[in-house]
Image (cartoon, rainbow, N blue to C red):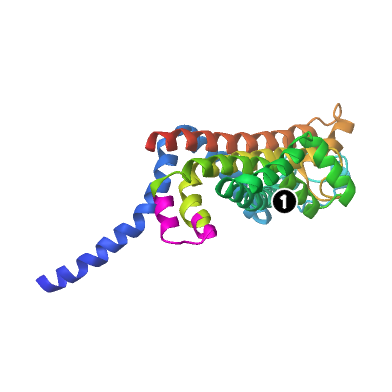
Amino acid sequence: MAIGKQASAPGIATRRSLGQPCRDAIAPILASKVALVGLGLVSFWILVAIFAPLISPYGPLEQDPEAMNLGPSAEHPLGADHLGRDLWARLIYGARTILVLAPLSVLCALAIGTTLGLIGGYFGGWIDEIVMRVLDAIMAFPVILLYLIIIVALGPSAINVVIAITIAGAPGIARLVRSLTLDIRTREYIAAAELRGENPFYIMFVEILPNARGPIIVDVMLRIGYAVFAIGTLGFLGLGLPPPAPDWGSMVAQGRINIWINPWAVLWPSLAISSLVIGLNLFADGLHEETMRYQ
């Protein structure tokens, strides 16, 4: 029996060691009330987006002629728009779109910006100068103007919205990663990796990037909130998803025409955009504060 107990001890230790990274990752979130509030807001929209067909008896494009510009009622809890479409259904199906496009666009910007920032910060010299000057040229454009130029040139669609946010967001991420790389490349373990003859890309992506992940993760969470706002802005300007897609920004634009008759058509999508952006910002702020304490 003693042998059996001794044999099981390594397995217990292994399970504990495997669970420790998860506990370390969750601990800052659980320790911050601000992060928990933000996570609650974001989780609400994620859940309603996933279970949209189960929590709404209507489709986002389904029209009810008798409910045009109807306020909240038993049949339509949040009211209906100028075409008789249920606002609750359009909100939760619109959440599906925005919760896919916003993280996707930021992840694309993250991949490009991280690569450029690592290359510029690690190699330095003329490589850094070329990379940074190109990115500075992009950042010289006002963000909204850059969105307009790209969308007008390519045409309004989900893919082109992702492309526009990726191009506008990559320079900022690259500058952040570059500054972190310039600091980390002076550490002793980087010098040791270079003495071992490691490939520069191995050093950048295996040695430097994991040690810079804290600020990058916080920045990414904030940028997803900015992307949500950008998607809503483009939709309001008619440069987002083509109608009749349930886009929160286009819902506000369509609802403002009859705002004095049916203010609900503007109120609910506006609250949806603001609540999701606030939730993402609160989560990022709380995570940043707790991460700094753990360091």
194 inside magenta stretch: yes
Image point (59%, 43%), residue name: 220
Q: In this rendering, is residue 293 above or below 4? A: above
Q: Secondary structure at mark 1?
A: helix
**Left or right placement of residue 112 versus residue 240 in this view:** left
The magenta region covers: 189-203
Horizontally, is 66 left or right of 27 in the view? right
Q: Quadrant of residue 8?
A: bottom left
Q: Quadrant of the N terminus?
A: bottom left
Outermost left residue: 2
Q: Give the residue type that dot 1 points to.
A: Thr
Residue 50 is one of the magenta-drawn residues: no
What residue is at 58 percent from the left and 43 percent from the top?
A: 178
Instruction: Give the left or right position of residue 108, taking residue 235 as reference.
Output: left
Q: Please tell me how many numbered marks the rendered image carries.
A: 1
Residue receiving disc 1: 97
